[in-house]
C-alpha cells in the first residue's frame, strides 16, 4: 500500500522520513531545567519506535517561564550540554530532533501534574508570574504582573538565546509555543489581553509581540532549518480567540518564515466549553491549511493509523502529531506501518521481531 503516513515530508532542507510527529508532552521530571536519564529514555524510545519528528516538551526560555519546577529549560549552557547526547541519539535513529520553546506566562509557577497542578506560593518555591495584563487565569491562580516594555525586550532576548542554544545542542526544528493559554496565547486572546498600548486592543496589536518574536527567532535560525508555531485555534469561549483570527495570524506567520502551524486549541480560560471527540481539532488544521496556504499539523485524539491516513490523503493536514497514543505505545509507527501494509525499516537490534 502506498501510505501517505509513511511518505516523507520536506520543510526547507529538513526531510522527515514519515508524517508522524511526537507532540511535545511535559514530563515534569527535570531538576533546574536540566534533562536527565528519564528524558533520554522517553525521547529515545519514541525515536527507536520510528517517529519522523520528535518535538521535546515545552522548554522554558527563563526560570520564570516554566510551568513548574520540574519543567525543562534552555536558559543556560548546562542545560544545553545535557541535551546534546539525547539529540544525538534521536538523530542516530533517523528521527528529526525538534524542541518547543516556551514561556508559561500567568500559568507558570505551578506544582507538577501529579501533585495537583496548583499555583505555588513563594514559600513553596513559587515565583512572580508575568502576563500581558494583570488578570489571573482563575480564582485559584496567582495574580500576574503586567509586562512592561523592559519585560518584553527581555522576553525576546530570552527566546533568541534559547534558540541559539537549541541549535548548538543539535536540534533541527524549533517550535514556538503560542497555544494552551501560555504567554504568547495570552497576548493573542482578548480574554487575557486588556492592554491599552501597541500590544493590546485590535487583532493587529494583539499579534504584534508573537509576530515580532517569530521575526527575531527566524533571524537566528539558518535558512535551511524549519520554524514551527503551535497555536490554539480557538479559546472555545465567547469573545475570545477564534478560528478566523487564527487564519489571519497564520497568514502573517507564513509571511515571516514559519513553515508549519501545529493546530491545537483551548487552555486560555477555565470556562472554556470544548466539544471533545475523535479528531475534534482536525477541522482547524484543515481550515488554516486551505485559507492561509501554509502546511499544518493535526493533533487531538488521533489514535488509529487508518484515521491518520485519511486525514493526510484528504488534504486536511500535512503532519500528524500524536501525544497520549505515543505514551501508550512508543512503537506506534512500527505497528501502524504493519496495519497499513507498508514495509519500513526497523532498528537493526529489533529486526528479529519484525
Image (tube, rainbow, N blue to C red):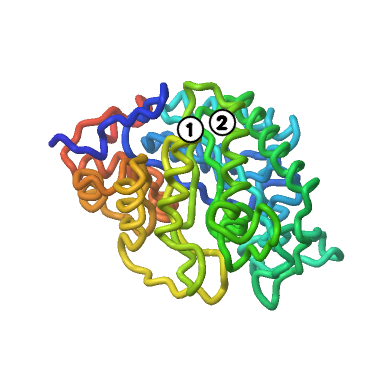
Q: Quadrant of residue 337?
A: top left
Residue situated furthest left in the rendering: 1
Identify the residue position indicated by label 2 in the image. Answer: 218
Where is residue 270? Give x, y as percent: 56, 73
**Is residue 180 placed above or below 313 in the rendered structure?**
below
Quadrant (top left/top right/bottom left/bottom right) for the N terminus = top left
Identify the residue position indicated by label 1 in the image. Answer: 257
CB of mark 2 within 8 Å of CB of mark 1? Answer: yes
Where is residue 350? Give x, y as percent: 35, 31
Where is residue 97? Give x, y as percent: 49, 32
Q: Quadrant of residue 277?
A: bottom left
Q: Looking at this view, is 297 or 203 the one in front? A: 203
Where is residue 76? Give x, y as percent: 75, 34
State left or right for residue 346 relative to residue 178.
Answer: left
The residue located at (25%, 49%) in the rendering is 311
- Please tell me which of labels 2 and 1 falls first in the chain: 2
Q: At numbered mark 2, what does the secondary structure look like: helix, strand or loop?
A: helix
Quadrant (top left/top right/bottom left/bottom right) for the C terminus = top left
In three-dimensional space, the C-alpha distance between marks 2 and 1, rounded to whole angstroms, equals 7 Å
Q: Looking at this view, is 193 or 159 the one in front? A: 193
The residue located at (70%, 61%) in the rendering is 196
Amino acid at each position: 500500500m502506498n501510505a501517505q503516513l509513511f511518505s516523507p515530508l520536506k520543510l526547507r532542507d529538513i526531510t522527515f522520513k514519515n508524517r508522524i510527529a511526537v507532540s511535545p508532552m511535559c514530563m515534569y521530571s527535570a531538576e533546574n531545567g536540566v534533562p536527565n536519564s528519564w528524558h533520554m529514555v522517553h525521547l529515545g524510545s519514541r525515536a527507536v519506535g520510528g517517529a519522523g519528528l520528535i518535538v521535546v516538551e515545552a522548554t522554558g526560555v527563563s526560570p520564570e517561564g516554566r510551568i513548574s519546577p520540574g519543567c525543562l529549560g534552555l536558559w543556560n549552557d548546562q542545560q544545553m550540554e545535557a541535551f546534546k547526547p539525547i539529540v544525538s541519539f534521536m538523530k542516530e535513529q533517523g528521527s528529526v530532533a525538534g524542541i518547543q520553546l516556551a514561556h508559561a506566562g500567568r500559568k507558570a509557577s505551578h506544582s507538577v501534574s501529579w501533585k495537583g497542578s496548583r499555583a505555588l506560593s513563594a514559600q513553596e518555591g513559587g515565583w512572580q508570574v508575568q502576563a500581558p495584563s494583570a488578570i489571573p487565569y482563575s480564582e485559584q491562580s496567582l495574580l500576574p504582573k503586567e509586562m512592561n516594555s523592559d519585560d518584553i525586550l527581555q522576553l525576546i532576548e530570552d527566546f533568541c538565546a534559547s534558540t541559539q542554544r537549541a541549535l548548538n545542542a543539535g536540534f533541527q526544528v524549533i517550535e514556538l509555543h503560542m497555544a494552551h493559554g501560555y504567554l504568547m496565547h495570552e497576548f493573542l486572546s482578548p480574554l487575557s489581553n486588556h492592554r491599552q498600548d501597541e500590544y493590546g486592543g485590535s487583532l493587529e496589536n494583539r499579534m504584534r509581540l508573537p509576530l515580532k518574536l517569530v521575526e527575531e527567532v527566524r533571524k537566528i535560525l539558518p535558512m535551511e532549518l524549519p520554524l514551527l508555531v503551535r497555536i490554539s485555534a480557538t479559546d472555545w469561549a465567547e469573545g475570545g480567540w477564534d478560528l478566523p483570527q487564527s487564519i489571519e495570524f497564520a497568514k502573517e506567520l507564513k509571511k515571516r518564515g514559519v513553515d508549519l502551524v501545529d493546530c491545537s486549541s483551548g487552555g486560555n480560560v477555565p470556562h472554556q466549553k470544548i466539544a471533545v471527540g475523535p479528531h475534534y481539532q482536525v477541522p482547524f488544521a484543515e481550515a488554516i491549511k486551505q485559507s492561509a496556504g501554509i502546511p499544518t499539523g493535526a493533533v487531538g485524539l488521533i489514535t488509529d493509523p487508518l484515521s491518520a491516513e485519511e486525514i493526510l490523503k484528504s488534504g486536511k493536514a500535512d503532519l500528524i502529531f500524536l501525544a497520549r497514543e505515543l505514551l501508550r505505545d512508543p512503537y506506534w509507527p512500527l505497528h501502524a506501518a504493519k496495519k497499513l501494509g507498508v514495509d519500513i525499516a526497523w532498528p537493526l537490534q529489533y529486526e528479529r521481531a519484525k
